[in-house]
Image (cartoon, rainbow, N blue to C red):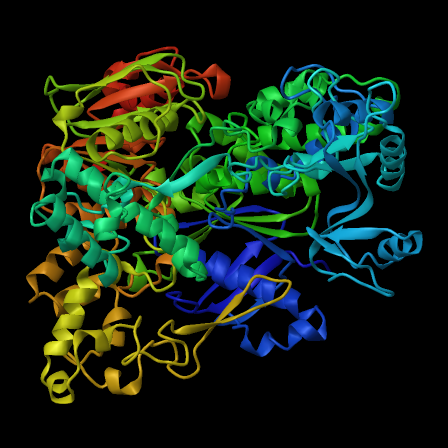
């Protein structure tokens, strides 16, 4: 009898309350519930984690030696489990070297295609390049060097790993000396090179001095013989070294007859920006050059430089001493807020004094000091910490194309590889289909072309047609990263697998949702079980089976409210999700939008990416939502143009905005703050307590307790980042990392402190019966009554509860927070600051990861910000947020090249009437009288 269900019995992982569920196999099952109710604990930390653990058990003895340390999920039993594949939000690489093309492997096929059938052109004059003979090579050498000593090398090996014993032996037998990795070396018998390192081996064929013959022309017979020999030895390559000049590589295969530029033999690595043979020599294949950004390095412009304004470098006593010396010499008042200093003083502190004057103080500027620190450090953690204070500017050599000029000059069907990868995926698919090859080229390219087309079709099928292959993976939203992996999985055609997805609908307009649901259904239809953690209404309605977890978040969640069909859920009065779906509860909209203040910020002539010379007016002092289908140009307009331009004007940021003509009205603001979904900290040591600043006050409180005073404990004793009070076995991490050679690293709880981070002496100090570890382990809403007597702490914690994050633990690792939670954490920090009413807040899809009820709480917070006179600018697809806006700017009409214009602008009721807007069609249902009646608003 075949197994029909995946049965979970007694799941107690995290906040799950001993629940048992039964999931029908080969169905699309949605797990829903409030944010923090335990959905991910069930889907990922229980079902997927057990599937992964069982997979590892089937591996070799080497892997099994770690198994006693791989934690088993806290569950009684799971039966009927298939091999599990997780497609999470956090798994997309954030490396600046990863692109959509490299993640999907399409770029690998393109590299092969261009190396096999590409037509090289001269990077200077653009002429097609053909092979050159030995005589032509000699002619060029003679033109360069009459009378100079010429060394002829045969490059046998160029930048490859291996011992090369046979090659060296052959050279020795022929009597040649060699230059190995830049050093001239005598070859000895049985000589081997280091196997795992890249090596370059060049045979020294001859040293020639050109002498004039009887006819007054150079005698080139010996040079001709040497060049011919080198070409024969090195498969058509010869390296010529002339005294006082750079060495030149000639090729009998490819060279421009006019400019004399030689192109090395085309290989797939010639088109790789991760290889020295393909990468642009200026930016090393990144497409941009990173440097410290003043807007990020000075973390708070409203404070004096040495009193809280400076971020990195503020702990260096040496730098502080140099700053004081420079301030004294140039009469800079360091007690003034940094923003109040004259421009000349700001620039002097950041970039250093003029050349020739640095010797007097030894001060070269804060940014120069940070650059030196970054170059000298060997710590990967410190390097990562410093990277967050840097910004990228486009590489002046490759203009963002990442590759060498010789590689960019290779064309297939008139396009370089960079031009092909810059196309939107729908246009790239059309172009790939129209590529026409004949004869020998057709035989070589046929299979490669089919692979590229097939993968592009899958990406277009999951609603990603507006992306391009050269889009950096670091700029993808969580939902886009998941949909790329989903497309890869559909392409693999696996069956009998359990797929676990985490909100794949993030960043999708309602219009594109159907394509995503169809992709999930096609995975199910070929014989897989698809388990999706989701809040999206359309996905829940289309599910075969629904599991609702709740009723609250954190300790108030973890109960199974319902398992059944979507219809059963809508009929169940205990399911909060069901009540929202059946329209028995609705998020109330404001009766009237806020009146316009008459002040505007105007962006004129925006032309970045797909924007078509757009002019947009954003009202000041109210809440504006920017809408439009995915890829219509919303992020380009708001994040890449308006935000960067304002940051440049207000803070002197280095990040270049996308092309625009002018921006008017920026003097209405004293601050512009972008609240995105990036993590609040990159290491497991970051947590809500450290991020909001309450941890300092808590440590001070513990240091003032009588027990601490008796023992002489200072606030540092209660930090898990320094020696003294922390557990030294795990160095305050609470967990230890086990390195797995062929699997992701596994983290296991520290067996000494049992995950509590501190040693026993520190834990003995208690406040109201709680040790510092107990306090960090509490949910924020539970810690609030304990710490209510400290006004500063109470305000910050209360704000976190107000934005719906009361269920998160004070000491919860920042790396475990979802993008939506991280964004609301930043919102809460802004709300607890002193308000000027002249701040512009920019948010990119803040409803990510939020249940209907959490969206209601978020809207209350956003309204609070706007009521204080601030300008709130939101990019959003969620209809509840859109209809709560005071003003809407709708971009479109389509994504990619079909977008980039403003389709509509006005109040929600005005935009709902615009027939050409895709958003209006979905918004209309809220303004049709028939739909409005029968709902009771939840306040």
In the depicted structure, whether residue 225 falls above or below residue 330: above
Total residue callouts: 0
Q: Is residue 143 left or right of residue 597?
A: right
Q: Nearer the viewer, residue 3 or 325?
A: 325
In this rendering, is residue 147 above or below 325? Answer: above
Q: Is residue 355 left or right of residue 320?
A: right
Residue 7 visible at all: yes
Taking 486 as reference, is 391 left or right? left
The location of residue 576, given as percent across then percent down, is: 32, 48
Q: Quadrant of residue 429?
A: top right
Residue furthest to the right: 173
Residue placed farthest to the front in the image? 214
Please indicate whether residue 870 sits to the left or right of residue 757 in the image: left
Q: Quadrant of the N terminus?
A: bottom right
Please indicate, yes or no, whether residue 549 appears anywhere in the rendered image. no
In terms of depth relative to the viewer, which is nearer, 43 or 413?
413
- Residue 293 x, y percent position in the rendering: 31, 41
> Front-most of 823 and 111?
111
In percent of width and height, residue 805 lies at: 26, 54
Identify which residue is drawn at 37% across, 24% down: 658
Q: Residue at x 44, y 35 (%)?
A: 538
- The structure residue drawn at horizontal position 77% and vertical position 16%, both measured from the top left corner, is 436
Q: Position of residue 48 (x, y in %)?
A: 55, 59
Q: Is residue 831 above or below residue 446?
A: below
Question: Vertically, is 752 above or below 58?
Answer: below
| Front residue (pair 33, 567) | 33
**The C terminus sits in image quarter:** top left
């Amino acid at each position: 009898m075949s197994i029909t269900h995946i049965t979970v019995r007694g799941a107690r992982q995290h906040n799950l309350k001993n629940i048992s569920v039964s999931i029908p196999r080969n169905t699309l099952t949605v797990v829903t519930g409030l944010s923090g109710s335990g959905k991910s604990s069930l889907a990922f930390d229980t079902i997927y984690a057990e599937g992964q653990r069982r997979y590892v058990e089937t591996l070799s003895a080497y892997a099994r030696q770690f198994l006693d340390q791989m934690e088993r999920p806290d569950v009684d039993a799971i039966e009927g489990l298939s091999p599990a594949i997780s497609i999470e939000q956090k798994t997309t690489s954030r490396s600046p070297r990863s692109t959509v093309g490299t993640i999907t492997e399409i770029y690998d096929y393109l590299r092969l295609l261009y190396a096999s059938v590409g037509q090289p052109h001269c990077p200077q004059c653009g002429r097609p390049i053909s092979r050159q003979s030995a005589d032509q090579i000699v002619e060029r050498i003679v033109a360069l060097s009459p009378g100079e000593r010429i060394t002829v090398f045969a490059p046998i090996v160029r930048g490859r790993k291996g011992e090369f014993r046979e090659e060296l032996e052959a050279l020795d037998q022929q009597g040649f000396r060699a230059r190995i990795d830049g050093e001239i070396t005598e070859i000895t018998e049985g000589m081997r090179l280091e196997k795992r390192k890249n090596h370059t081996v060049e045979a020294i064929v001859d040293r020639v001095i050109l002498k004039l013959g009887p006819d007054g022309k150079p005698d080139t017979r010996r040079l001709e013989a040497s060049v011919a020999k080198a070409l024969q030895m090195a498969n058509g390559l010869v390296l010529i070294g002339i005294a006082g000049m750079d060495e030149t590589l000639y090729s009998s295969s490819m060279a421009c007859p006019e400019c004399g530029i030689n192109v090395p033999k085309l290989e797939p690595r010639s088109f790789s920006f991760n290889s020295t043979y393909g990468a642009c020599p200026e930016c090393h294949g990144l497409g941009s050059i990173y440097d410290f950004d003043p807007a990020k390095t000075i973390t708070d412009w409203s404070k004096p430089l040495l009193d809280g304004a400076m971020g990195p470098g503020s702990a260096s006593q040496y730098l502080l001493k140099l700053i004081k010396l420079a301030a004294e010499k140039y009469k800079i008042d360091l007690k003034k807020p940094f923003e109040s200093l004259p421009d000349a003083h700001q620039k002097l502190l950041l970039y250093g004094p003029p050349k020739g004057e640095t010797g007097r103080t030894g001060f070269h500027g804060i940014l120069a000091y940070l650059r030196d620190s970054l170059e000298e450090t060997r710590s990967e953690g410190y390097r990562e910490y410093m990277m967050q204070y840097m910004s990228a500017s486009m590489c002046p050599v490759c203009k963002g194309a990442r590759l060498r000029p010789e590689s960019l000059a290779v064309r297939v069907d008139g396009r370089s590889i960079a031009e092909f990868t810059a196309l939107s995926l729908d246009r790239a698919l059309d172009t790939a289909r129209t590529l026409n090859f004949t004869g020998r080229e057709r035989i070589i390219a046929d299979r490669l072309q089919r692979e590229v087309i097939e993968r592009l079709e899958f990406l277009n099928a999951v609603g990603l047609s507006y992306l391009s292959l050269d889009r950096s993976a670091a700029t993808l939203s969580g939902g886009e990263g998941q949909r790329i992996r989903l497309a890869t999985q559909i392409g693999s055609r696996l069956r009998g697998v359990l797929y676990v997805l985490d909100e794949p609908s993030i960043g999708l307009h309602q219009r594109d949702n159907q394509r995503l649901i169809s992709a999930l259904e096609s995975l199910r239809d070929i014989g897989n079980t698809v388990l999706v953690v989701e809040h999206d209404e359309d996905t829940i309605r289309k599910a075969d089976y629904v599991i609702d977890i709740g009723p609250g978040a954190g300790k108030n969640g973890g109960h199974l409210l319902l398992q059944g069909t979507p219809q059963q859920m809508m009929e169940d009065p205990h399911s909060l999700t069901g009540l929202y779906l059946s329209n028995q509860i609705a998020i109330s909209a404001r009766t009237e939008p806020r009146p316009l203040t008459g002040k505007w910020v105007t962006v004129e002539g925006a032309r970045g990416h797909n924007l078509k010379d757009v002019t947009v007016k954003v009202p000041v002092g109210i809440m504006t939502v920017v809408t439009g289908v995915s890829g219509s140009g919303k992020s380009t307009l708001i994040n890449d143009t308006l935000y960067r331009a304002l940051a440049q004007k207000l803070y002197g940021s280095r990040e270049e905005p996308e092309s625009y003509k002018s921006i008017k009205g920026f003097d209405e603001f004293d601050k512009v703050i972008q609240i995105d979904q990036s993590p609040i900290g990159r290491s497991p040591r970051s947590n809500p307590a450290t991020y909001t600043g309450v941890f300092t006050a808590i440590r001070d409180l513990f240091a003032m307790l009588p027990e601490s005073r008796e023992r002489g404990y200072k606030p540092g004793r209660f930090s898990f980042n320094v020696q003294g009070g922390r557990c030294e076995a795990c160095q305050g991490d609470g967990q230890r990392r086990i390195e797995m050679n062929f699997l992701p690293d596994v983290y296991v709880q520290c067996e000494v402190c049992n995950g509590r981070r501190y040693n026993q002496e520190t834990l003995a100090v208690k406040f109201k019966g709680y040790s510092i570890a107990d306090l960090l382990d509490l949910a924020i809403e539970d810690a609030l009554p304990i710490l209510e007597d400290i006004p500063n702490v109470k305000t910050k914690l209360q704000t976190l509860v107000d934005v719906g994050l009361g269920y998160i633990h004070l000491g919860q690792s920042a790396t475990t927070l979802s993008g939506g939670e991280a964004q609301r954490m930043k919102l809460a920090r802004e709300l607890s600051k002193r308000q000027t009413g002249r701040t512009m807040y920019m948010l990119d899809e803040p409803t990510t990861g939020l249940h209907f009820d959490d969206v209601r709480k978020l809207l209350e917070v956003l309204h609070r910000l706007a009521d204080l006179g601030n300008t709130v600018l939101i990019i959003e697809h969620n209809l509840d947020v859109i209809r709560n806006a005071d003003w809407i700017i709708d971009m479109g009409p389509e994504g990619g090249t079909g977008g980039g214009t403003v389709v509509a602008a006005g109040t929600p009721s005005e935009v709902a009437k615009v027939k050409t807007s895709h958003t209006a069609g979905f918004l209309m249902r809220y303004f049709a009288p028939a739909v409005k009646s029968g709902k009771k608003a939840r306040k």
